[in-house]
């Protein structure tokens, strides 16, 4: 199977890889989701993982990530999240195709039929995210490079509320500024985010914002600020953004607790 002329982007998120005895489950979770992606026919154009690649941002955790994704045969783009460490991520992957040139964590990938733009919203030591004026200006010009090519803007922190108060309290600080940029560029077919550990969809600019499920563990749909927060035993999975004859459709593909076809690599 090879990537076909029907472009699609597989959107994975929040693998939270770690090491030691607790490292087995998140590593197996990411491996299982990537294996499910490979079983798609045709295979997608590329895979994006929208941050929280590791649980603590330690070099040994990035080594574990390298072990899981090193032999994956499709283009795979990494974004940084609040659990990541920018320097450790860069030094682990600067010689790989998984980041920008020289290990840049903010970068642009121009595939033949889709553009992928990865933003870096990490504020060291904070659960919140921020892009900043310079990065937003860079995004504005990056989006203007190929205005007729469908484009995916990827950022860990959701730039708009998702209705879960404890998560909305640690979102992207300059989400409205990002929305203004996105609204100027109709080639943005989706803004892809993580951080939420469950799939959501909302309008954003002239586009759609989706958050991907975690490949490891899902957060509860906790709609009250008074309720305890935590994780729930819901299926892992990913989103598949696929072009159709009239536009783009997003599939939520569940992976654990299911009997879907699993590939291997
Ligand atoms: Fe996360």
Image (cartoon, helix red, strand yellow):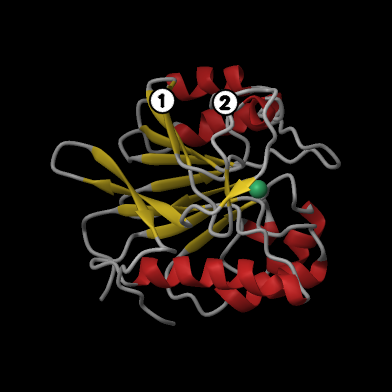
- Which percent across, then down, holds residue 144? 44, 31
Q: Is residue 258 above or below residue 104?
A: below
Query: How many circles with numbers are drawn on the protein?
Result: 2
Q: Residue 225 appears at what percent x and percent y?
A: 68, 23
Residue sitting nearer the eye, 134 or 252: 252
The Cα atoms of the two marked residues, 2 and 1, are separated by 32 Å
Mark 2 crowdedness (10 Å alpha carbons): few <14, some 14-19, many ≥20: few
Query: In the shown orientation, is residue 40 left or right of residue 69?
Result: left
Residue 256 appears left or right of 15: left
Which residue is painted at 30% across and 51% down in the image? Answer: 113
Mark 2 CB in 8 Å range of ligand 1? no
Q: Quadrant of residue 157?
A: top right
Task: Tell me the residue that label 2 is attached to.
Answer: 223
Residue 185: mark in rendering: 1
Circles 2 and 1, Cβ within 8 Å, touching? The answer is: no
The residue furthest front is 227
Q: Nearer the viewer, residue 107 or 210?
A: 210
- Where residue 44 sits, quadrant-wise, is bottom left
Query: Residue 212 or 65: which is nearer the viewer?
Result: 212
Residue furthest to the right: 125
Disc 1 secondary structure class: loop
Camera-nearest label, 2 or 1? 2
Q: Is mark 1 within 8 Å of ligand 1?
A: no
Query: Who comes first in sequence, dot 2 or dot 1?
Result: 1
Secondary structure at numbered mark 2:
loop
């Amino acid at each position: 199977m090879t990537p076909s002329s029907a472009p699609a982007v597989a959107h994975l998120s929040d693998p939270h890889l770690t090491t030691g005895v607790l490292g087995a489950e998140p590593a197996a979770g990411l491996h299982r989701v990537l294996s499910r992606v490979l079983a798609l026919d045709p295979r997608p154009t590329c895979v994006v993982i929208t941050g929280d690649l590791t649980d603590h941002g330690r070099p040994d955790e990035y080594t574990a990530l390298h072990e899981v994704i090193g032999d994956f045969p499709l283009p795979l783009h990494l974004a940084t999240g609040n659990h990541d460490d920018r320097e450790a991520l860069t030094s682990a992957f600067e010689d790989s195709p998984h980041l920008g040139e020289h290990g840049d964590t903010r970068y642009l990938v121009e595939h033949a039929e889709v553009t992928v733009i990865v933003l870096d919203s990490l504020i060291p030591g904070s659960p919140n995210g921020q892009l900043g004026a310079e990065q937003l200006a860079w995004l504005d010009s990056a989006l203007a490079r190929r205005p007729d090519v469908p484009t995916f803007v990827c950022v860990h922190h959701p730039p708009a509320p998702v209705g879960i108060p404890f998560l909305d309290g640690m979102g992207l600080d300059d989400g409205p500024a990002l929305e203004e940029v996105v609204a100027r560029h109709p080639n943005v077919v989706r803004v892809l985010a993580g951080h939420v550990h469950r799939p959501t969809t909302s309008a954003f600019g002239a586009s759609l914002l989706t958050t991907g499920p975690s490949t490891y563990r899902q957060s509860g749909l906790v709609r009250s600020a008074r309720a305890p927060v935590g994780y729930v035993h819901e299926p892992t999975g990913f989103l598949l953004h696929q072009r159709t004859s009239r536009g783009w459709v997003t599939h939520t593909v569940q992976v654990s607790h299911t009997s879907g076809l699993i590939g291997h690599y």
